[in-house]
Amino acid sequence: MSQSQSEYGTGISATGTMVDESQNDLFVLDAIVENAKILSQVLSTLNGPKVDHVNIEVAEDGIHFMVDVSQCFQGRTCITKDLFSRFIFSGDRCERFSVVLDVLLDCLNIYGTAATPGLKIMYKGYETPLFLIISDDDVITDCGIRAMEFRNILPIDIGKSDLLAKVIINSESLQEAFNELDWTNDSLTFILCNDDPCFRLISTGTGASCQVDIPRESEMFETFQCQEYFKREYKMKLLHPCLKALKLASKTQIQVNRDGILQFEHIIPTEDKLKCSFVNFSIVPNEEDSDEGGYFH
Amino acid sequence: MEAVIPTKGVKTFYHILQCLTKIGEHLFLEITPEKIRMSTLNQNRSAFIGFNLDPRYFEEYNYHTGAESLLYRVNLKACEYIFRSYKSVEQCKLVALEDDDVFTFDMMCKMGLKKTCKLDVEEGEPLQAIYDRATFPNRIRVRPKVFRDYLANFHSTLREVTFRLDHDEVYIRSYVDDQNEDSTSLSKRCLHTDLRMNVEEFDKYEFTTERVSLTFSYKEMMAVLNFCELQTHPITLYLGTEGKPLLVSLSIPNAFDADFVLATLLEPEEQDASGSTQSGSTYTQSQVKSEIYSPSPSYPNSSISSSMEYSASPISTFSSQTPSTVGYRRKYDGFHDDTPQKKRKFSNDSDDEVVWADDLGL
């Protein structure tokens, strides 16, 4: 057993291939995705500066992914069972491990980002690597990714009771609004309130400052609910990854709570528009500053 | 001052900013009740652009301060960055308040989105190259596309081209600085392009002097022609003799008029015995000054000596068109200025070193 374990550790079995079909019954997870692009696209939105590991939790309903940067920024997504053409989970409640996100993305994109390869995911359980078999036409690639300990990280919970505002907005328009700002600046101030301008982004840098307003009656909003005046500052570096997903998303829900935690939930439709996946980002604000200096208030 | 640019004017305004950004680093704004003047000068001081925007260009133009004129200096790259999404801008309002140190762009975009940008400004000195169109002996009136298409045949990394004008022929040839030992680019040394232009393609060709060759910057001329072509209006080129600057002029009624002044190279007659080629350039011997004058008391008149790659004869020898035109005279001696005068610290960018007013040549 120890010999085969070390073999699995390196990902190469005695016969020279990564995994043998005869070992099928040993697998805790056996899943097939017709088009790996959906996985690689959604997972690439989680990638950002300082993101290295992704926590993976395999359960009955699908595979959950989570990234965290110093508990200030978290991204979560779940690739649900219905997005797979085959999903067989034979483990106990759930299997947890983590892998390096860059490595996982490199494997999924091995045929380039334009390709639409088929993907088979296999996992044998604790202390074994994650196997991927990716095929594009007749070319088959076997990948064995070393799985590491699941990192126990407290999720940044926005809490349902303390919500101050909830906005559902068209993703393309939100992206346009954010693109108007200068992303080389350090921080961004986000203001939500009931009177016009109800949605305001302010970013100040050396020599210039920019403010973007969206009025209440704009067609961009599907829903706009705001209980109280909200104004907090966020680091632009942390906000940027949340917005990469806007390119793929159709609608975005923004929620803020009393502590200033900002949550984006993006709906990303599949290519055939029949199904969708959700990507969730939570960001912790900068410390509150009493200094109100600047161009805008 | 408040000026509102209508939807159809936004694109042109962006092209104006784009053209200015290709030439210089700073935008000089001179706002008067009669016009808004936007001008820039390049680092070499060999190219100058001035746009005069008529109040009729704007949907609304309110000048309601007591001051005769408002003068500002802003960073051009920042301006162009603000306007980069001009396609979604439906209306733009420019606001300048007298005692404020910001210049505001208020933009209304699609779907109700409103963008407000404030740029830090410094007090500017007016910038104007002084010249008189009447004194240029040769003129060409042409559609900018004609010239641009001819010039597009040259290699994009070319630094200078030479126009050779004759009574019924115009040649364009790539210019290679033979004495420049730094010229390592293979294409520069091996590839020479020579074109003959068809004078019939010009709307008007007035040639009154002897045959003349004018050498000027290729990149800057292309930037000018690219802008002019977008306006689909014919341009007039005013050409003098060697060493004298050349002027490209575009005028769109009820909108704006633009003057682009490019310095031309003056070939040295002979090399000084003691002269050495500093950094490969032989033009240090010419001692020709490019001057842009100002009678402002804070910049006392003094002798100017500067060595530049482009030696244009003094633009100032042409009498100014309007008596109130002012420009600058710089006291400039080896990048060092030791007269005690009012110096202002301009530090737009956080990583720039302190730049003194005089070093900017303004």
Image (cartoon, grey):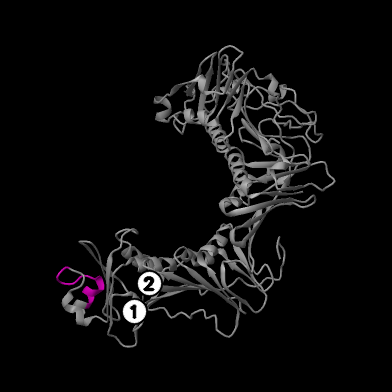
On residue B52, the disc is none
Kind of residue at disc 1:
Lys
Chain letter of disc 2?
A: A
- In this rendering, the answer to whether A284 lies above or below B30 is below
Q: Which residue is situated farthest in the top direction here? A: B210
Per the image, is B323 magenta? no
The chain ID associated with circle 1 is A
Which residue occupies the foreground of this view, A144 or B18?
B18
**The C terminus of chain B is located in which quarter?**
top right
Q: Is there one chain holding both mark 1 and mark 2?
A: yes
Q: Name the residue under label 1.
A: A81
Q: In this view, does B322 lie above or below A61?
A: above
Can residue A262 be seen at all in this image of the molecule? no
Q: Where is residue A74 in the image (x, y as percent from the top left)?
A: 48, 73
Q: Give the range drawn in magenta.
A: A5-16
Left or right, residue B237 beside residue A292: left
The residue sitting at 52% across, 14% down in the picture is B168
Which one is nearer the viewer's eye here, B248 or A210? B248
Q: Where is residue B295 in the image (x, y as percent from the top left)?
A: 80, 31
| Residue B246 lies in quadrant | top right
Callout 2, which amino acid?
A: Leu
Whichever of labels 1 and 2 marks the residue nearer the N terminus, that label is 1
The residue tagged 2 is A274
Mark 1–mark 2 distance (CA, rounded to whole Å): 14 Å
Mark 1 falls on what kind of element?
helix
- Residue B76 shows up from this direction: yes
